Structures are given as C-alpha cells and as structure tokens.
Image (spheres, helix red, strand yellow):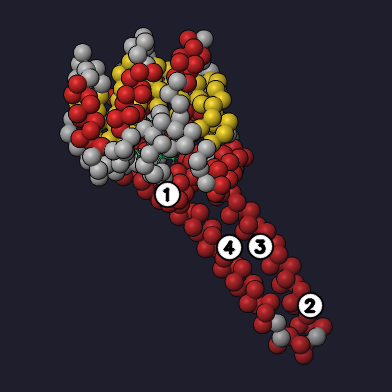
C-alpha cells in the first residue's frame, strides 16, 4: 500500500521545511510519497524544497511556471500521485497531519473518501468564519450534490476516486465539489483547525470570492433561474403598475404630470435587475469561454522531479 500526500506551496519559505519534517515524522511508519507542488512562489520556497528532496528519495516536486492557484496545484498533484490512497493537505499544517492515520483506518474500513470536517477554526477572522459558514450553506441549498459543510480540501481519496477526478474534462476545478460529484462511499472526521504558525494566508478576499463563485457556478444553474424569477416578478409588477397608470390618467387627467419619484424608482430598479441578470449570464458565458479554449490547467516550469528510491 502506497500513500501519496499532495501539498501545494505558494510563498511558504517560513514553513516549507517544518511541513516537510512534520509530515515525514508523522508518516514514518507508512509507506508514502510526498508530492509538493510549488505554485509559482516568488520567494525561496522552490530552493528549500529542492534542497530537502535532494536528500530524501521517493518524493516528487512539481514546479509551475507561474501562480496557477491552489486548486490547480491539487489537480497537478493528483495527476502525478501514484498512491493507492491520496491525501491532499495544505502546506501550512493548519490541518493536523496526525489525522491521516485515522483517515487510513476509515479507508481500510472501505470508505473511498474520508474528508476532514472542521469543528472549530482558530486564528481566523470573524469575517472569514462567517462568510465560510454562509458559503457552505448557500452552496448546499443551490446545488443538488451534498457537499458536507465546513470541510476544506483536506481529505483522503481512494485511487479510483482520484482516477475519475483526473479524467474529468473541465477546467474550472472546485475540488470539494468534484469529489462529491463522483460519489463513492464517504465519511467525515471532525477536527479542530489550528492557527497558521508562520507566514500569512495566501487567500485574500479576491481569491476567496473567486473560489466561491467557482463553486456555485460549476455546480448549479440556480443563479440563472434567479434572474428568470426576478424577470417574472418585475414583469408582473410592471403590468399592474401599467394598468394603474392608465386608470390614473383617465380618472385624474390633471395630476398625471406628477410622479417623478415613482418613475425614477422604476427606471433605477429595472436597470439594476437587468444589469444583475446580464452579470449572471456573463459569469456563465465566461465559464463556457474558459472551457471552450481548452487551455491546460497549469504549465510545468520543468519536468517534475521524481527521485526514485
Ligand atoms: N496556495 C497555493 N496557491 C495559491 C494560494 C495558496 O498553492 O495561490 C497554498 C498555500 O501555500 C497553502 C494552501 O494553498 O499551502 C492554503 O493556503 P492558505 O493557508 O493561505 O489558505 P487559508 O488556510 O488561509 O484558507
Ligand atoms: Mg491556511
């Protein structure tokens, strides 16, 4: 049994070595390979990883030609992982690697996906916790697949699950959703998420929003329906208003010159609804455009280095 552990790294020079050593000691009794993905770091991350792996045979280092993002890094890792079971984990060790042993027990019990579910999360702003908890609940109410709430990417997957995900043709990869989409028997493990011990979060609000829209639009067309429903409602209201204004014109011909505020309101409101709907359409068209272009998910800087044992 070989276990692959995939670790994305973006500007993690303060943590790279500690992460490597911790994983090595936690996994000392398990036959494993580490697959580091350097996601276009601008600091010394690559150099440090190369140094560490030069001395440790059996691991893989994948180096992107630029920053392609966390989800692309996981995809690359999954394409290179050779294990019978594959774990994906963040490089900052906010998720306790010791949990891998429990994951393996569940895996041996016959679960093909074992995801880690956050019971608490430390050291994250109130805003991040609140938006994250909303996000999972909105996502679940909009999509028809069951994405467990409060799970990150930290999870173990069986070889079969990984193969199926690797074979999915889509470019926009919201991994947590894809794993649920492929199905198989899955279970969760509760854990407490620790603080980052060094460095800062590489997920600014902009990237979080991107991930959230990716998640929703890749798994649900509910926003499109929303604009249809908004359209229906405003058409209904405008029909009633139309009837009312005709009646008003007939009954009180003298006062119909008034009504600047109501006109303004209608114009502004309809303008808002229309732009919103066009925006939602645009989001989906942009996605179709991305898929049609068929660009690769990531580009490797040089062939990945696999130093065999
Ligand atoms: N990461 C990455 N590419 C990016 C952003 C982040 O590979 O563009 C990596 C990062 O190095 C870390 C993991 O993804 O190992 C999770 O990032 P982070 O800890 O910043 O996210 P947070 O825990 O704040 O959600
Ligand atoms: Mg983190």
Say which residue appears at 24% left-offset and 17% top-offset. 58
Q: Residue tagged by mark 4? A: 273
CA separation in Å, label 4 and label 3: 9 Å
Q: Is mark 3 within 8 Å of ligand 1?
A: no
Tag 4 and tag 3, C-beta contact below 8 Å: yes
Label 2 crowd bin: few (<14), some (14–19), many (20+), radius 10 Å? few
Q: Are marks 4 and 1 in contact (CB under 8 Å)?
A: no
- Give whichever of 134, 128 is nearer the camera: 128
Q: Nearer the viewer, residue 77 or 22?
A: 22
Q: Position of residue 291 (x, y in %)?
A: 36, 42
Q: Answer with mark 1 or mark 2, whichever residue precedes in sequence.
A: 1
Instruction: Residue 3: tell me if it is visible.
Output: no
Q: Is 241 placed above or below 309 here? A: below
- Mark 3 or mark 1: name the one nearer the start of the chain: 1
Which residue is tagged 2? 247
Q: Position of residue 254 (x, y in %)?
A: 77, 90
Helix or strand or loop: what does disc 4 sit on?
A: helix
Locate ligand 1 by image quadrant: top left
Say what secondary structure mark 1 lies in: loop
Q: Tell me: residue 305, above or below residue 265.
A: above
Q: Nearer the viewer, mark 2 or mark 4?
A: 4
First in sequence: mark 4 or mark 1? 1
The yes-or-no answer for disc 1 within 8 Å of ligand 1 is: no
């Amino acid at each position: 049994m070989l276990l692959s552990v995939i670790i994305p790294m973006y500007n993690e020079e303060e943590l790279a070595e500690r992460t490597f050593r911790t994983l090595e000691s936690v996994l000392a009794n398990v036959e494993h390979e580490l697959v580091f993905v350097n996601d276009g770091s601008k600091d010394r991350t690559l150099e440090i990883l190369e140094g560490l792996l030069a001395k440790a045979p059996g691991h893989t280092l994948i180096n992107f030609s630029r920053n392609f993002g966390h989800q692309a890094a996981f995809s690359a890792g999954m394409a290179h992982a050779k294990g019978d079971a594959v774990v994906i984990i963040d490089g900052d060790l906010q998720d306790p690697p010791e949990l891998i042993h429990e994951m393996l027990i569940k895996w041996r019990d016959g679960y093909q996906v074992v995801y880690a579910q956050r019971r608490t999360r430390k050291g994250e702003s109130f805003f991040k916790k609140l938006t994250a908890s909303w996000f999972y609940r909105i996502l679940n109410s909009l999509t028809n697949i069951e994405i467990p709430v409060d799970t990150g990417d930290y999870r173990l997957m069986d070889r079969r699950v990984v193969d199926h995900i690797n074979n999915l043709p889509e470019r926009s990869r919201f991994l947590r959703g894809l794993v649920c989409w492929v199905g198989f028997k899955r279970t969760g493990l509760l854990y407490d998420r620790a603080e980052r011990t060094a460095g800062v979060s590489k997920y600014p609000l902009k990237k979080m929003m991107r991930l959230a829209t990716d998640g929703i639009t890749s798994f649900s067309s509910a926003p499109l329906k929303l604009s249809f429903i908004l359209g229906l409602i405003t058409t209904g209201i405008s029909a009633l208003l139309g009837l009312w204004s005709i009646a008003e014109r007939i009954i009180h011909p003298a006062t119909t010159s008034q009504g600047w505020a109501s006109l303004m309101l209608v114009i502004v409101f309809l303008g808002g609804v229309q732009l919103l709907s066009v925006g939602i359409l645009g989001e989906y068209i942009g996605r179709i455009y991305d898929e049609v272009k068929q660009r690769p998910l990531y580009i490797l800087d040089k062939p990945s280095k696999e130093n065999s044992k």
